[in-house]
Image (spheres, grey):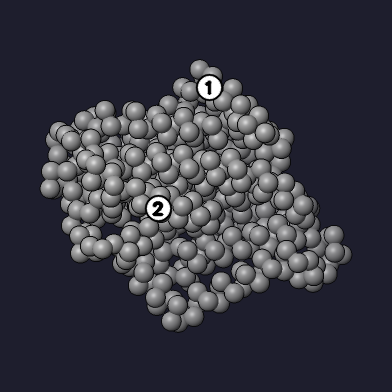
Amino acid sequence: MEIFDNLALGFSVAFTFQNIFYCFLGVLLGTLIGVLPGLGPVPTIAMLLPITFGLPPVAALIMLAGIYYGAQYGGSTTAILINLPGESSSVVTAIDGYQMARQGRAGAALATAAIGSFVAGSVATFLLAVFVPPLADLALKFGPPEYFALMVLGLVASVALASGSVVKALAMVVLGILLGLSGQDVYTGAPRFTFDMLELADGIEFVALAMGVFGIGEIVRNLEDEHTRTVMVQKVKGLLLSKDDIKRIIGPILRGTFLGSFLGILPGGGAILSSFAAYSIEKKISRHPEQFGRGAIEGVAAPESANNAGAQTSFIPMLTLGIPSNPVMALMIGALIIQGIVPGPNVVNEQPSLFWGIVVSMWLGNLMLVVLNLPMIGIWVRLLTVPYHILFPLIVGFCCIGVYSVNNNSIDVFTMAVFGLVGYVLVKLDCEPAPLLLGFIIGPMLEEYLRRAMLISRGDPTVFFTRPISATMLALAILALVVVLLPSVRKKREEAFKE
């Protein structure tokens, strides 16, 4: 009965006029940035973080969460209509979705994406409500050695699941940790990695780094190679699915939902990984695998369900352990800190209205996405014709205003510009920037728990191996790193990501 009482609390929080408005605003902005190729939830949430200063914590997080799962939904629109995914997790949707559009079935593809997203989002939110409270209670029993081991495991998992070279992903994590350690020492207050610059005494501004690497860097990359966008369908018809279509999508939606729900918890971008995995599974078990790539409706249903489920279950490690599983969750942790809330298991126990309000708002937001987006598909089609060279200067200007407003400090704008250049260089070197942001967020916490554990054990490093939970997690981290570095595994991994 406790869960029903908690859900009643969540409904009382989420169904206020203010929170319904911010939920609506979040999913609308999320769909918009998902539709426009070249944008994404990371730069958008980074840009909007300064705005959340003046909002209540619940409203701020409801809006930011809506942007994230709204972007997962919106990315499918461009993938289906112009074969250009608005989101990286929608890459797989484009394979069969665009072929369906070419065959005059764009409405059926968009309806399938909407149904899959709604079902997956609802199931994943239910899992969030069921599993987060007991996991949060378990996390309260963790000490510094367990948290240190858990963070090491999370960083290693982000390296193993990152696309591209393992060595480059590992280098990005190390670089992120080093950047996160700049500023004053946690215990002594001594400056480090500041290069005698007073502006770096408090460390590198998180919003400036996130906006630079993911916002400005992506904008420069897209301007360098602006895509020619040809909208296949000017007016979408046939949004109602036939009985045969419904019969064909039920299985893929359910399989994609549960696969995405599991993979979304893993660090390193579970929404992206789950969409690829769901597509591969459907192709292997299908009686007609030759239809995949030629307009199979299952090829839209499975990945769309998987990436939306993965997006929402990625909140589980963030809310229970205070550890981000992807860059968006790292930004959500930043939003919690801005609001004066310490991320971790205490959020569920000490801020029940915040947690359950967010959970219920996800159900509401998923319903809004279906009700709003299918009737508004004509507006999204027209938005696709906006040229990049008109759109992106406005975004850069908004980025500069947003970064400056955090501390009213012009050095943050220059920091954003520097990291924009860094982000562009990383893209050109085929280095995925997501592990860098995870390292930047987790690095200071990793150091703090390491030093706490060493203080408690009076300098005895065996404390990490004599406690069962920390020893198990460190062993898993070492095993995962060794396995992924094996030549045969590394080769198959690279082939899988390439495919």
Residue found 64% across the figure and 59% down from its top: 151
User: Taking 155 as reference, is 366 above or below it?
Assistant: above
Residue found 63% across the figure and 31% down from its top: 4
Q: Which residue is mark 2?
A: 256
Q: Quadrant of residue 235?
A: top left
Q: Is residue 335 left or right of residue 33?
A: right
The mark nearer the N terminus, 2 or 1, is 1
Q: Contact, CB < 8 Å: mark 2 with mark 1? A: no
- Quadrant where the N terminus sits is top right
User: Taking 278 as reference, is 206 above or below it?
Assistant: above
Res 47 seen here: no
* x then y, percent, for residue 223: 27, 48
* x then y, percent, for residue 425: 39, 59
Distance of label 2 from label 1 (alpha carbons): 30 Å
Which residue type does callout 2 highlight? Gly
Which residue type does callout 1 highlight? Phe
Q: Quadrant of residue 357?
A: top right
Q: Secondary structure at mark 2?
A: helix
User: Taking 6 as reference, is 134 above or below it?
Assistant: below
> Tag count in the figure?
2
Q: Which residue is mark 1?
A: 15
Of badges 2 and 1, nearer the viewer stands 2
* x then y, percent, for residue 468: 76, 67
Q: Secondary structure at mark 1?
A: loop
Residue found 54% across the figure and 53% down from its top: 265
Q: Residues within 10 Å of mark 1 (few under 14, many from 20)?
A: some
Q: Is residue 134 left or right of residue 417?
A: right
* x then y, percent, for residue 481: 56, 73
- Give the camera-side residue of 329 and 243: 243
- Give the camera-side residue of 335 and 358: 358
Q: Residues within 10 Å of mark 2 (few under 14, many from 20)?
A: many
